[in-house]
Amino acid sequence: MTVAVIIGASGGIGGAVADALEEEGAFTTVHRFARSASGPAHIDITDEASIAAAAALVAAGPAPSLVFVATGVLHDDALGPEKALKELDPAWLARVYAINAIGPAIVAKHFLPLMPKAGRAVFAALSARVGSITDNRMGGWHGYRASKAALNQLIRTIAIEERRRNSSSIVVALHPGTVDTALSKPFQGNVAPGRLFDAGRAAVQLLDVLDGLRPPDSGKLFAWDGVEVTP
């Protein structure tokens, strides 16, 4: 049996990834977890107890060979990405870090030990190109950029440790491009023609990237087109 786990399955990308996996039929079981779900499918990546509970549910069955973390925050009803230093808010920064960086790392803490100790196993988390320090030429979006840079570093560090447990494992961050979801909705006006992807297309693109990765790619950030993004 082959098992996949999608964290953030109620979101645009997470839901589309889960749908694509089920349609492809490559996995006999696709576990969907989301903050908006009730019962055993509920997970809040800012609450380690709920992550541990989700992991315990998965641990009762066959080992997952894919764990895909599709959670993230860029804005809410009141706050969004900072345009200037004067807009920095400690509480908002802490929330952005908690969701974008700390949450996926705690998911890895609880789910990677459930994955096979030999053979191909993939742990992927959604990141963003704006998390690249070398690619940052415009400034702004301080919290989002920094939290994604932190996630990219965590992915790198986790990948090194995971390689000691399973030399065939792949731990990566993924940049999905600009996807037509609630996260990107306020910022779609400046997207170049043909570069705003619907969630279904984005999911297939990301899964195609994962299919093409090999163990030496572990610890890196890849864009939707398979090109590595420099940290």
Image (cartoon, rainbow, N blue to C red):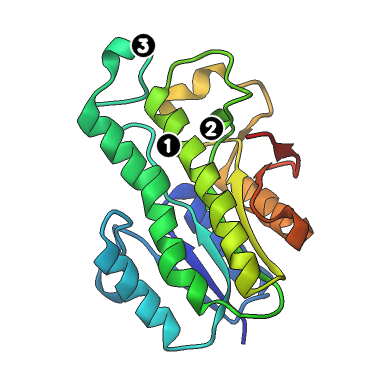
Q: Is the C-beta separation of discs 2 and 3 under 8 Å?
A: no
Up-down relation of residue 140 to residue 40 (above or below): above
Q: Is the C-beta separation of discs 1 and 2 under 8 Å?
A: yes
Residue 177 is labelled as none
**Residue drawn 70% across the image and 70% down it:** 167
Amino acid type at circle 3 is Ala
Rendered-image quadrant of the N terminus: bottom right
**CA separation in Å, label 1 and label 2:** 7 Å
**Which residue position holds label 1?**
147
Instruction: Assign a secondary structure to mark 3.
Output: loop
**Which residue position holds label 2?**
131
Question: Which sits earlier in the primary sequence, circle 2 or circle 3?
Answer: 3
Instruction: Assign a secondary structure to mark 1.
Output: helix
Question: Which sits earlier in the primary sequence, circle 1 or circle 2?
Answer: 2
Question: Measured from the top left, where is residue 197 in percent x and y?
Answer: 61, 37
Q: Quadrant of residue 195?
A: top right
**CA separation in Å, label 2 and label 3:** 17 Å
- 219 or 82: nearer the eye? 219
